[in-house]
Image: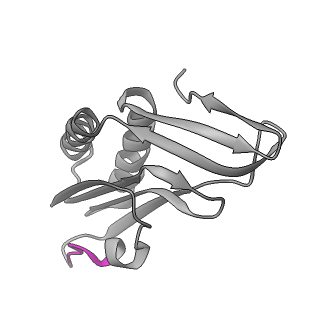
Amino acid sequence: MKDIYIQEETIDIAAILDKGASSSDGADIAFIGRVRNNSRDREVTLIDYEIYPEMALSELNKIADEAIEKSGLNRCIIVHRYGRVFPGETSIIIVVSAPHRGQTYEGSRYIIDEIKKRVPIWKKEHYTDGSEWISDRS
């Protein structure tokens, strides 16, 4: 089972965690990324995420397919927010399931690392004393 979303609305973590769960899987991993209230020694007031929707969805689907193939995942859900997100709010959730825990750790890590490298999502951090565009790509 694979589900990929981009949305402006708040992410309903409980609904995502329950979606598509199977008794054939012995391990579930949920990665929940939240906006921090500080970054680079500055107080963050909010982050604006901008996204190229069609390309982002295409790349997220490719990454999910790669993780499913590579790690033997049975469930892969990725939800990424765009728009204005405040400290403490969830900006991304990745839920993966597989028969064994090692598969889920590997799959989850692969997905978040590849999202940071490949998906056209940009973020502008706003601080109490200004703002700047941030790149997570290395």
Q: Residue at x 34, y 67 (%)?
A: 27
Above or below for 65 versus 84: above
**90 within the magenta span:** no
User: Can you give x and y, in whole percent of width and height, for residue 43 in the image?
Assistant: 81, 48
Question: In this view of the protein, which residue sits in the foreground, 16 or 113?
Answer: 16
Could you say which is closer to the camera, residue 22 or residue 48?
A: 48
Q: Residue 55, how many percent across, how many down?
A: 24, 32
Q: Is residue 64 left or right of residue 132?
A: left
Q: Residue at the far left: name it.
A: 1
> Viewed as shown, does residue 102 lie left or right of 57?
right
Q: Is residue 49 left or right of residue 125?
A: left
Q: Position of residue 104 (x, y in %)?
A: 36, 55
Residue bounds of the magenta highlight? 18-22
71 up-or-down from 31: above or below: above
- Secondary structure mostly taken by the magenta-highlighted segment of the chain: loop
Q: Which residue is rendered at x = 81% and y = 47% of the image?
A: 128
